[in-house]
Image (spheres, grey):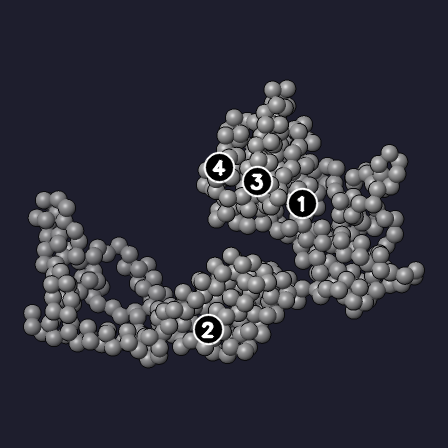
Amino acid sequence: MSDLFSSTEKDGVPVNRPLADRLRPNRLADVVGQEHLTGPDGVLTRMIASRSLGSLIFWGPPGTGKTTVARLLAGETDLAFEQISAIFSGVADLKKVFEAARLRRTQGRQTLLFVDEIHRFNRSQQDSFLPVMEDGTVVLVGATTENPSFELNAALLSRARVLVFKALGPESLARLLERAEEAEGKELPLDEEARAVLVRMADGDGRAVLTLAEEVWRAARAGEVFDAEGLQRVAQRRAPIYDKGQDGHYNLISALHKSVRGSDPDAALYYLARMFDAGEDPLYLGRRLVRMAVEDIGLADPQALVVANAAKDAYDYLGSPEGELALAQACVYLATAPKSNAVYTAFKGAMAAAREHGSLLPPRHILNAPTKLMKESGYGAGYAYDHDAPDAFSGQDYFPEEMGRRQFYDPAERGFEREIRKRLDYWAKLRRERGEDR
């Protein structure tokens, strides 16, 4: 076996370790798929060369090498390596790790503390890292699959640099399979199409592609070569229906959006289910449903945005698979709601006007006059307090004088917007009457 990989023996006796564990690189330069971090000009390569390693947050999907890179960083900077998981650790565990790190420091050695799933620690637990980071007791390397901006304390983020790990592309996954074949001393019993399907099944996860390769080797009889259908039967899983960054992804999200817009809950559910089945991030789908609520329903049903947001939060709270039902419920609600893009269209019109007339001052009568000079200059003069007027409506013009009144919002005659249109028509009538009186 190449010396790129970890040994598979202990005291001369082969150890039955998973292939993904046996193929962990022994050098940072041999990490696959993260060349922007570990390549010759990568961020981590430069840090090591400068002998200056600060605390870091690794953000990226599962199986992209976060744990491996942390371990290699410790080795290449001669730091003691400690690893804990936020899933299984509590305050008592943290105290033990910190005490051990302090003891090492008195002996002249610093500790690299790798915290997997760091976002699962609560706010007070995250704060407990701050003192040992500040006094140099540990170099913290936290790993998370969630957006650090939302899941980690600002104080923690201000003391650590966030590095993004990318999902492994097909070429990187293919390289891992080649390494696996080199390590095993035999080729995968797959035809060309099945090999491509295996890469798609892994969906950017290096650990997954090696685990799948092990399953194939275990299942194959002497001389047997699997085609794509045979692979799926052996692996008991389907290949993702699309790559999340490619056409299939955009085709399905477009179909889902247009089905909701077209008030077809059955088609909308079908495309939602296809995206779940393909392994799409449910929170991405939740965000898209929120967008549909504001773009295609708007004020025709003001509850649409509330429902979509609540479904997104429910998924975030429940996780998969229970939370998927909340997104499905929101999908059906949006598809069956009255539709209006009036606010969407009005906003685009207002943005265009803002770009064209962005230098104009509002009329002086609606500007505050906190100083004597501003009062003398006419700021606030003639302003009518709407609550003092009949119907709490003064009918004043609020646009810059050079523009004149504009209409951007034209509510639909559907749903709640029908009521809004009645109000606007009534106020327009009062504006005309009061304008004639002045």
Q: Earlier in the sequence, mark 4 or mark 3?
A: 3
Q: What residue is rendered at 7% in x and 72% in y?
A: 437
Eye-nearest disc, 3 or 2: 3
Q: Which mark is residue 333?
A: 2
What residue is shown at x 78% (from left), y 67% (from top)?
Answer: 233
The answer to which of 386 and 330 lies nearer the viewer is 330
Which of marks 4 and 1 precedes in the sequence?
Answer: 1
The residue type indicated by label 2 comes to Tyr
Structural distance between the alpha carbons of marks 4 and 2 = 41 Å
Q: Residue at x 61, y 70 (%)?
A: 274
Residue picked out by circle 4: 127
Residue at (80, 57) in percent of width and height: 215
Badge 3 density bin: few <14, some 14–19, many ≥20, Cα 10 Å: few
Residue 371 position within the rendered picture, expressed as x and y whole percent measured from the top left: 13, 44
From mark 1 to mark 4, how far is it between C-alphas?
26 Å
Q: In which quarter of the image is the N terminus?
A: top right
Of the residues tagged 3 and 1, which is closer to the observer?
3
Which mark, residue 90?
3
CA separation in Å, label 3 and label 2: 41 Å
Does label 3 or label 2 sit earlier along the sequence?
Answer: 3
| Residue 213 numbered mark, or none | none
| Mark before the other along the chain sequence, 4 or 2 | 4
- Secondary structure category for the residue under label 4: helix
Q: Along the line of sight, which residue is nearer the eye, 411 or 63?
A: 63
**Residue at the disc numbered 1:** 65
Q: What is the three-letter code of the residue carrying label 1?
A: Gly
How busy is the neighbourhood of tag 2: few (under 14 within 10 Å), some, or many (20 plus)?
some
User: Tag 1, which secondary structure?
Assistant: loop
